[in-house]
Amino acid sequence: MSDSQNSAAEREQGSAFMPKFDAAGLLSAVVQHAQTKQILMVAFMDREALDKTRETGVAHFHSRSRGRLWKKGESSGHVLEVEDILVDCDQDAIVLKALPKGPTCHTGAVSCFYRSLDKNGLHPAEE
Amino acid sequence: MSDSQNSAAEREQGSAFMPKFDAAGLLSAVVQHAQTKQILMVAFMDREALDKTRETGVAHFHSRSRGRLWKKGESSGHVLEVEDILVDCDQDAIVLKALPKGPTCHTGAVSCFYRSLDKNGLHPAEE
């Protein structure tokens, strides 16, 4: 196998954590409620946010609009306590299984995904 | 309110679907099993992938590595039948609630998130 094949195989099958950041230095992070399994939000993490999350046990992201580290709940107090972190096959996306201390969405909704899409547009989601 | 505030409010509270693509023309798409609620994969969609998904009812993405439309399962047959689409507050991320026709991950795993991260590295996830 070539080096790049070896590296891909190691990334997929190995036990070493080798997060793959994109050209902007980011990876995708999905937050799922550890108990209800509802998807609460999707955001991005850079190395700093990932390290802070692992170090503190509460979710940190990289805010693309503000261009800085963003501790979720830093102003509202609605932090996300991380119970588990799942990593995908090519290590460019993670799932945080978390217990939220309040609504996750800044609108006050439990989840940012409070609308469902059909042919006519958006309507309140059932969940 | 300013125009940009009006537009943000409309995007958050309205019933009009106004997907917000990033500078690369992409938004994040998370696939969740419609029944078990397990998160199966995370990928990106451009306008074409989003339109194709809505039109056909099976998940399409934009492959960043191949730079083209990618129908999930186009070679394996393991397509994702979309049952519902959820949209987040600022309309830059979506959740596809789907029924998979086979393993979702190209490694043969049910989900791409088959490993859990702790201080020592990766190990098989329980789910």
Image (cartoon, coloured by chain):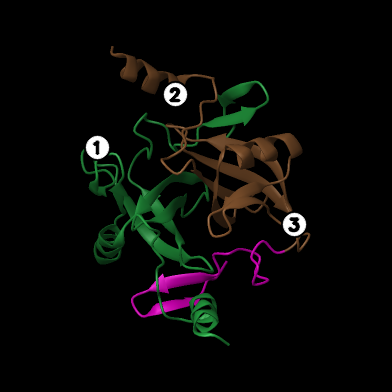
Chain colours: A green, B brown
Q: Which mark is residue A126?
A: none
The circle drawn on residue A76 is 1
Range drawn in magenta? B103-127
Residue at image position (32%, 45%) is A101
Q: Earlier in the sequence, mark 2 or mark 3?
A: 2
Secondary structure state at the residue bearing disc 1? loop
Residue B58 is situated, as x and y percent measured from the top left of the image, at 72, 45
Q: From the image, which quarter does the N terminus of chain A lie in? A: bottom right
Q: Which mark is residue B74?
A: 3
**Chain to which the residue tagged by mark 2 belongs:** B
Q: Is residue B2 left or right of residue B61?
A: left
The answer to whether one can see residue B32 in this image is no
Do the residues indicated by labels 1 and 2 lie within the same chain of the protein? no
Q: Nearer the viewer, mark 2 or mark 3?
A: 3
Is B38 or A14 nearer to us in this picture? A14
Residue A20 appears in the picture as rendered: yes
How crowded pointer 1 is (Cα within 10 Å; few <14, some 14-19, many 20+) is rated as few
Q: Label 2: few (<14), some or many (≥20) within 10 Å? A: some
Q: Along the line of sight, which residue is nearer the eye, A2 or A22?
A: A2
The amino acid type of the residue labelled 3 equals: Glu
Which residue is depicted at the point 60% across and 23% down? A121
Q: Chain of mark 1?
A: A
Q: Is residue B114 magenta?
A: yes
Label 3 packing within 10 angstroms: few (<14), some (14-19), many (20+): few
- Quick one: SS at disc 2? helix
Amino acid at the residue labelled 2: Arg
On the image, the x and y values in percent for residue A7 come to 48, 80
Point out the residue furthest to the bottom here. A1
Task: Please state if B67 lies on the left or on the right of A105 as rendered.
Answer: right
Q: How many marks do you count on the picture?
A: 3
The residue pinned by badge 2 equals: B11
